[in-house]
Protein backbone atom coordinates (compact mmCIF):
# COMPACT_ATOMS: atom_id res chain seq x y z
CA UNK A 1 0.00 0.00 0.00
CA UNK A 2 2.62 2.56 1.02
CA UNK A 3 4.81 1.35 -1.83
CA UNK A 4 2.29 2.86 -4.26
CA UNK A 5 2.61 6.23 -2.52
CA UNK A 6 6.40 5.96 -2.58
CA UNK A 7 6.28 5.18 -6.31
CA UNK A 8 4.00 8.17 -6.91
CA UNK A 9 6.39 10.48 -5.06
CA UNK A 10 9.34 9.04 -7.00
CA UNK A 11 7.54 9.67 -10.30
CA UNK A 12 6.64 13.23 -9.30
CA UNK A 13 10.24 13.92 -8.33
CA UNK A 14 11.52 12.45 -11.59
CA UNK A 15 9.14 14.64 -13.56
CA UNK A 16 10.38 17.70 -11.71
CA UNK A 17 14.02 16.83 -12.46
CA UNK A 18 13.56 15.58 -16.03
CA UNK A 19 10.25 16.97 -17.15
CA UNK A 20 8.60 15.38 -20.16
CA UNK A 21 7.19 18.00 -22.50
CA UNK A 22 3.65 16.61 -22.52
CA UNK A 23 3.50 15.70 -18.83
CA UNK A 24 0.53 16.92 -16.79
CA UNK A 25 2.80 16.90 -13.74
CA UNK A 26 5.23 19.24 -15.55
CA UNK A 27 2.32 21.54 -16.37
CA UNK A 28 1.48 21.73 -12.66
CA UNK A 29 5.13 22.36 -11.73
CA UNK A 30 5.35 25.15 -14.30
CA UNK A 31 2.19 26.94 -13.16
CA UNK A 32 1.99 27.48 -9.39
CA UNK A 33 -1.45 29.09 -9.58
CA UNK A 34 -2.79 26.12 -11.54
CA UNK A 35 -1.25 23.71 -9.04
CA UNK A 36 -2.87 25.49 -6.10
CA UNK A 37 -6.23 25.80 -7.83
CA UNK A 38 -6.22 22.09 -8.68
CA UNK A 39 -5.64 21.16 -5.03
CA UNK A 40 -8.53 23.41 -4.01
CA UNK A 41 -10.74 21.99 -6.76
CA UNK A 42 -9.93 18.37 -5.92
CA UNK A 43 -10.54 18.90 -2.20
CA UNK A 44 -13.92 20.40 -3.04
CA UNK A 45 -14.74 17.42 -5.23
CA UNK A 46 -13.70 15.02 -2.46
CA UNK A 47 -15.91 16.82 0.07
CA UNK A 48 -18.81 16.67 -2.37
CA UNK A 49 -18.18 12.95 -3.00
CA UNK A 50 -18.17 12.26 0.76
CA UNK A 51 -21.38 14.22 1.23
CA UNK A 52 -23.04 12.35 -1.63
CA UNK A 53 -21.39 9.02 -0.74
CA UNK A 54 -20.19 8.52 -4.30
CA UNK A 55 -16.85 8.32 -6.10
CA UNK A 56 -14.93 8.94 -2.84
CA UNK A 57 -11.92 6.74 -3.68
CA UNK A 58 -11.38 8.36 -7.07
CA UNK A 59 -11.59 11.86 -5.63
CA UNK A 60 -9.33 10.98 -2.69
CA UNK A 61 -6.70 9.70 -5.14
CA UNK A 62 -6.93 12.99 -7.07
CA UNK A 63 -6.40 14.96 -3.85
CA UNK A 64 -3.36 12.90 -2.86
CA UNK A 65 -1.74 13.25 -6.28
CA UNK A 66 -2.31 16.99 -6.54
CA UNK A 67 -1.22 17.56 -2.93
CA UNK A 68 2.02 15.63 -3.51
CA UNK A 69 2.76 17.76 -6.59
CA UNK A 70 2.01 20.96 -4.65
CA UNK A 71 4.30 19.92 -1.81
CA UNK A 72 7.16 18.90 -4.12
CA UNK A 73 6.85 21.99 -6.28
CA UNK A 74 7.24 24.13 -3.16
CA UNK A 75 10.23 22.28 -1.72
CA UNK A 76 8.21 20.48 0.94
CA UNK A 77 9.40 16.89 1.21
CA UNK A 78 6.89 14.29 2.32
CA UNK A 79 9.62 12.84 4.55
CA UNK A 80 9.65 16.10 6.51
CA UNK A 81 5.86 16.06 6.79
CA UNK A 82 5.99 12.46 8.07
CA UNK A 83 8.63 13.45 10.62
CA UNK A 84 6.40 16.27 11.84
CA UNK A 85 3.49 13.86 12.19
CA UNK A 86 5.71 11.46 14.09
CA UNK A 87 6.59 14.24 16.55
CA UNK A 88 2.88 14.79 17.17
CA UNK A 89 2.17 11.18 18.10
CA UNK A 90 1.23 10.68 21.72
Image: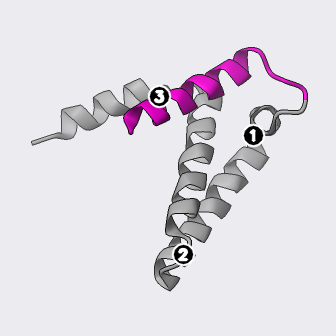
Residue depicted at 77% across the width and 15% down the height: 18
Cα separation, mark 3 vs mark 1, equals 23 Å
User: Is residue 81 placed above or below 37 in the rendered structure?
Assistant: above
User: Is residue 77 placed above or below 68 in the rendered structure?
Assistant: above
Mark 3 or 1 closer to N-term? 3
Cα separation, mark 3 vs mark 2, equals 26 Å
Cα separation, mark 1 vs mark 2, equals 26 Å
Asked which secondary structure carries label 3, the reply is helix
Mark 1 or 2 closer to N-term? 1
As drawn, is 28 to the left or to the right of 13?
Answer: right
On the question of residue 53 being in view, the answer is yes
Residue 11 location (% of width, % of height): 63, 26
Q: Which residue is mark 3?
A: 6
Q: Magenta part of the protein: which range?
A: 1-21
Mark 3 or 2 closer to N-term? 3
Q: Which residue is mark 1?
A: 32
> Mark 1 Cα within 10 Å, few/some/many (few <14, many 20+)?
some
Q: Nearer the viewer, residue 37 or 8?
A: 8
Amino acid sequence: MLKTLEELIKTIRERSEKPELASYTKKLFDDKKLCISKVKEEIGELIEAVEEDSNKIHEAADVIYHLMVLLESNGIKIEDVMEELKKRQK
